[in-house]
């Protein structure tokens, strides 16, 4: 006989997986427990366990994740493997947090596998895809992918690595943590306690004769400088940066202290991105504009297939800024961000708002979703 706590955990994970949730949260409140799952970036409630069961559920998670069940006062991290219910096994990252009313547990249900990575499915417009593929086919240079947390940067980078992942190229990555295992790629996880930082790993890569390096995130000048040096000495370097848009990335690196001439000499492309929820194709409805002129746009409705949300999955919108002679000149002369942005648009850059409008026009997403995301 399965214990009630074990059964509850199995059922709630199964529900979250069926709804393609990325995360599952078990949160203690003053008067009970709350269970929520994140689907396409938005939290949705799930049935909560009875108060008498909750501690048993948390303990069960901690046992499976190899955590110390007696320790409830400090945060802990671990991993566990769970059955999805359809024969597949799920690799789940677990973290606990001591809160006022008890331990809060977050489960990252790793949804992405290397087979799902595909540059043609990211949401790039055809011309953007060509620009991006051309940039990563060069043997050297720096390609930056930027955006806030949860904007899909990681999946974009991994999809690019999949394109590059071939026997004739050696690829090394440093990440915090390693998110998706890629066969044939040397992936290193940052370990601050052991002194393995992004910068330390990158410096070690330079002695490992790689063709391609990926830096999970450029956070400081030291990492930026080594990444630029590597990109300048015959390596293709892919990296992410935490900025809102493509022109802002240049300003960010200069603010960190990167020398303008090094940046101009090595940067080949900046990609900024956001994720928008895709309208459910089964229930989206076309709404005509009040004027009656034009084709109108689609709005979210909600049906049983999308669990009433009106949305199903997400798609990226992108802004690509290739480094040009004129942009380089502006960077060297210390121009402001809006001057860089204006020059990039003159050179044909589709900005994030343009890209989102295009997705609304295509009926892929709604006006409301585009407005909320940008
Ligand atoms: Zn639907």
Image: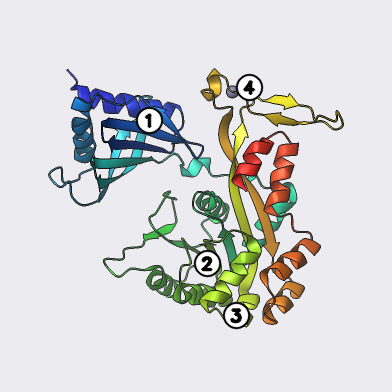
On the rendered structure, is 298 left or right of 164? right
Where does the image place residue 30, in percent across and percent down from the top left? 26, 35
Q: Secondary structure at mark 1?
A: loop
On the rendered structure, is 209 left or right of 267? left
What is the residue that sits farthest to the right in this orientation?
Answer: 293
The quadrant in which residue 132 appears is: bottom right
For mark 3, what is the residue? 262
For mark 2, what is the residue? 211
Please state which of the two labelled residues, at mark 2 or mark 3, is closer to the viewer.
3
Residue 3, compared with residue 104, is above or below; it is: above
Inspect this view and state whether residue 57 appears: yes
Q: Residues within 10 Å of mark 3 (few under 14, many from 20)?
A: some
Please state which of the two labelled residues, at mark 4 or mark 1, is closer to the viewer.
4
For mark 1, what is the residue? 88
Residue 192, compared with residue 364, is above or below; it is: below
Q: Secondary structure at mark 3?
A: helix
The quadrant in which residue 198 appears is: bottom left
């Amino acid at each position: 006989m399965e214990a009630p706590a074990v059964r509850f955990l199995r059922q709630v994970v199964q529900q979250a997986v069926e709804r393609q949730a990325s995360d599952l949260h078990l949160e203690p409140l003053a008067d009970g427990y709350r269970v929520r799952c994140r689907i396409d970036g938005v939290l949705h409630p799930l049935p909560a366990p009875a108060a008498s069961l909750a501690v048993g559920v948390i303990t069960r998670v901690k046992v499976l994740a190899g955590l110390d069940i007696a320790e409830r006062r400090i945060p802990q991290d671990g991993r566990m493997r769970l059955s999805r219910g359809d024969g597949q096994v799920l690799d789940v990252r677990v973290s606990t947090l001591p809160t006022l009313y008890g331990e809060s547990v977050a489960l990252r249900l790793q949804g992405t596998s290397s087979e799902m990575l595909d540059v043609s499915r990211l949401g790039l417009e055809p011309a953007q895809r060509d620009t991006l593929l051309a940039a990563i086919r060069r043997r050297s240079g720096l390609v930056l992918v930027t955006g806030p947390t949860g904007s899909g940067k990681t999946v974009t980078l991994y999809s690019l690595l999949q394109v590059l992942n071939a026997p004739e190229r050696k690829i090394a990555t440093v990440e915090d943590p390693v998110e998706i295992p890629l066969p044939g790629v040397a992936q290193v996880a940052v370990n601050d306690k052991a002194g393995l930082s992004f910068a330390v790993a990158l410096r070690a890569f330079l002695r490992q004769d790689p063709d391609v390096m990926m830096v999970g995130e450029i956070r400081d000048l030291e990492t930026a400088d080594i990444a630029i040096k590597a990109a300048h000495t015959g390596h293709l370097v892919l990296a992410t940066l935490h900025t809102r848009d493509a022109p802002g990335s240049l300003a960010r690196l200069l603010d960190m202290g990167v020398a303008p001439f090094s940046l101009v000499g090595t940067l080949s492309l900046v990609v900024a991105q956001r994720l928008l929820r895709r309208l459910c194709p089964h229930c989206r409805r076309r709404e005509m504009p009040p004027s009656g002129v034009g084709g109108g746009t689609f709005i979210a409705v909600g049906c049983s297939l999308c669990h009433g949300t009106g949305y199903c999955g997400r798609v990226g919108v992108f802004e690509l800024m290739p480094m040009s002679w004129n942009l380089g000149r502006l960077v060297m002369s210390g121009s402001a961000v809006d001057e860089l942005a204006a020059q990039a648009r003159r050179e044909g850059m589709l900005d994030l708002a343009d890209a989102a409008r295009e997705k609304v026009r295509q009926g892929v997403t709604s006006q409301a979703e585009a407005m909320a995301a940008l």
